[in-house]
Amino acid sequence: MSVQPADESLEGYCNIEDVLDFFDRFEPGESNVPTNRIERQILAKSQRIDSYTGHAWRERKVNEEYKNLNNTYRWNSGMPIYTQKRDIRTPLDPEKGDAIELWDGSDYTDLVGEEEYSEGRSEDFWVEESTGVIYLYRRQILFSRYREVRVSYRYGKEIIPQSIREICAKLVAADMMETDFYRYTTPGNEEAPNAEAVAEGFREQAKNQLEPYKEVRGTGLE
């Protein structure tokens, strides 16, 4: 299974102005502001937030998540497939890479891509978007004695909370404080706080703010 952006134009969780709000000395559009570097860091930190929380507030895509069809068939619902993500984007679209592929022992049958199957609450399959559960409803499609399925789907909320925007900007600002750019452009004095200490404080604050959003065990923040 792999997780990747749904398209190449995926944006980050904050912008340059959000990052520069943490600094009194810099303004958007100034020639000495490393715009390209900040934009790259925004994308990198947004990816770290996704990885740490196991969730997303933008469209992401899971490719080929393998499952065994060993769950109990539920009356009036179907056999559930519990995906690793929630907030699945619907309707499932084969042109965007969405797929529910059943293995029959020699080949896969894609319920999303083949016209003879349809999505809907009383059709062949349906999706409970908020919980990330896919249901195979029609019993006749549960034909494979191998009981294996692989699913590809898009997921993620459509609105970025203000708290996620602030966390992303704070993580990028922390990295900026440890660069030569910040040291060279910020005059120091004996009463000024240590930049490295402030940066570590920002990262700790961001980590604590992300804890309520965690869905799966993350790999840590850098």
Image (cartoon, rainbow, N blue to C red):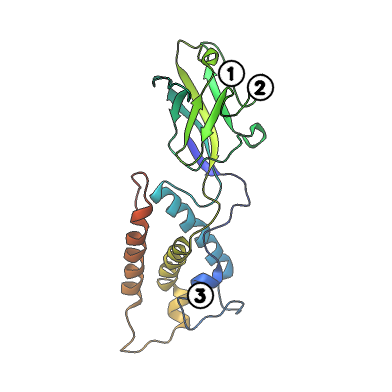
The residue drawn where x is 40% and y is 69% is: 174
x then y, percent, for residue 115: 68, 22
Dots 2, 1 in contact, CB < 8 A: yes
Q: Which quadrant does the C terminus fall into? A: bottom left
Residue nearest the viewer, comparing 216 with 44: 216
Q: Is residue 76 left or right of residue 99?
A: left
> Disc 1 marks which residue?
109
N-term-proximal mark, 2 vs 1: 1
- Give how far across and how far down residue 31 sits, in percent: 61, 78
| Front-most of residues 14 and 120 | 120
Alpha carbon of mark 1 to alpha carbon of mark 3: how far?
51 Å
Which amino acid, by three-letter code, is at mark 1?
A: Thr
Q: Position of residue 197 (x, y in %)?
A: 31, 73
Of the residues shown, which amino acid type is indicated by label 3? Leu
Q: Give the distance between the C-alpha atoms of the residues marked 3 and 2, in whole angstroms.
A: 50 Å
Q: What residue sits right under mark 3 in the picture?
A: 20
Residue 114: assigned label: 2
Marks 2/1: CA–CA distance: 8 Å
Task: Classify mark 3: helix, strand or loop.
Answer: helix
Q: Secondary structure at mark 2?
A: loop
Q: Which mark is residue 78?
A: none
